[in-house]
Amino acid sequence: MKRNIMTVIALSILMGFIPPYSSPLGLKAGGSVNYYAISDSLFKDLYGTGNLMFGGQVSFEIIEKYEIRGEVNYFRDTGKMPITEEEIKFTFMPIVLGMRYKVLKVSLISPYLGAGVDFISYKEDVPDRFEDVSESTTGYHVEAGSYIKMTGRFYIDLNVRYIKADVEPFDEKIKLGGIRVGLGFVISF
């Protein structure tokens, strides 16, 4: 965890020294640190209220104010079985295709609204006497946030996202969606 934080800080400092050049293509790339809270009550009983989600993204401004984007995110949480209190692990990896509309640009901030499709693979590792669950599903998201220009080509992306993704691995609906609040570090090319 400390290594991830130090890497983000080092990249942030280095990006501040890159000369300000912006391509007319509107290409951006970056990473994010998010807090993800899955909304399912059974999940909360086993794993708690949420955990960190890490991600990487690329985006392309197709026309002024409209941006298409792709993301890969990684979420992992550990919990305990209800009676035996044996450790269980849950891994959640969404691959996201989305679009953002920049509502306006005021000085250094650019608020946006967005939506997209989430292709999610997930896995739950349980004790050996049970069978692990490894499935995938498709969901969607809506989001709001803002880019904040820091220096030259470097931006901070503040974001709140609602994800809707339901699965039925054992004929019981589980809501893997929830609220994600994040901080992204973006560089434009």
Image: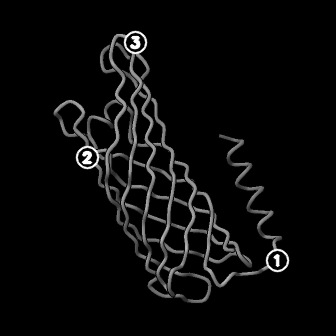
**Between marks 1 and 2, how big is the CA–CA gap?**
45 Å
State how many labels appear.
Answer: 3
State the residue position of label 3: 128
Image quadrant holding the C terminus, namely: bottom right
> Is disc 2 surrounded by few (<14), some (14 to 19) or many (20+) residues within 10 Å?
some
Task: Tell me which residue sits at (38%, 41%) in the image.
Answer: 49
Residues at badges 3 and 1 in contact (C-beta under 8 Å)?
A: no
In percent of width and height, residue 6 lies at 74, 48
Q: Mark 1 points at which residue?
A: 19
Q: In which quarter of the image is residue 15?
A: bottom right
Tags 1 and 2 touching, CB below 8 Å: no
- In screen coordinates, is 71 left or right of 143? right
Q: Considering the numbered disc 3 on the image, is that residue within a helix, a strand or a loop?
A: loop
**Viewport quadrant of the N terminus:** top right
As drawn, the residue found furthest toward the top would be: 129
Residue 84 image position (x, y, % from top left): 34, 13
Picture layout, residue 1 above or below residue 26: above
In the rendered image, residue 142, in percent from the top left (x then y), is placed at 35, 66
Marks 3 and 1, how far apart in space? 54 Å
Residue 81 in which image quadrant: top left
Element type at marker 1? Answer: loop
